[in-house]
Image (cartoon, rainbow, N blue to C red):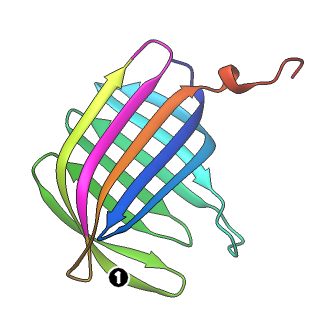
Amino acid sequence: MTKDVMVTIAGFHMAEEDEDTIEMVHIGEYYERNGTHYILYEERMEGMAEPVKNRIKIRGHRMELQKRGPVTADMVFEEHKSQSSTYAIPYGSFLMETHTKKVEIQEEEACFLATASYELNVNGVRCASCDIRVLVQPRKTFRLEGT
């Protein structure tokens, strides 16, 4: 796959009777080194002057998400394991715990897909059952004709 990619991050959260789905598309970079997949992209957040720099690192049944900038976090999704991390935003920080059920990876010549299913606790309180999907495709597949 090429280095210049479109990264689609989709998340589904179910808390009690509420469901929420979000999907974001970013231009980014992808590379693979020694069996580990790296996805880099910047995220512009409303009300913040500088972007949040994101790095997703995937190997086997483990996905790591690192955020740097006005938002900082180090989240790890590893099958059948629990992880704790601090999620810091300009207005404060909170403790996030993930209890990962499953991480799956599908590699094809023209795309890369990683998914994780997990339970999310914030400051010790169970918040939601979550799914995250990371789809990486060559950027050229999204260009309009003539561009």
Quadrant where the C terminus is found in the figure? top right
Between residue 108 and residue 117, name the one nearer to us. 117
Query: Residue at label 1?
Result: 94
Q: Secondary structure at mark 1?
A: strand
Q: Position of residue 81 (x, y in %)?
A: 11, 54
Specify whether residue 54 is painted magenta: no
Kind of residue at disc 1: Phe
User: In the orientation shown, which residue stands out farthest toward the right?
Assistant: 146
Q: Is residue 37 above or below residue 15?
A: above
Write the residue at 34% across / 69% down: 17
Q: Is residue 134 above or below residue 30?
A: below
Write the residue at 33% across / 50% down: 131
The quadrant holding residue 19 is bottom left
User: In the orientation shown, which residue stands out farthest toward the front?
Assistant: 17
Between residue 118 and residue 58, name the one nearer to us. 118
Q: Position of residue 56 (x, y in %)?
A: 41, 45
Magenta stretch? Answer: 108-120
On the rendered structure, is 114 left or right of 5?
left
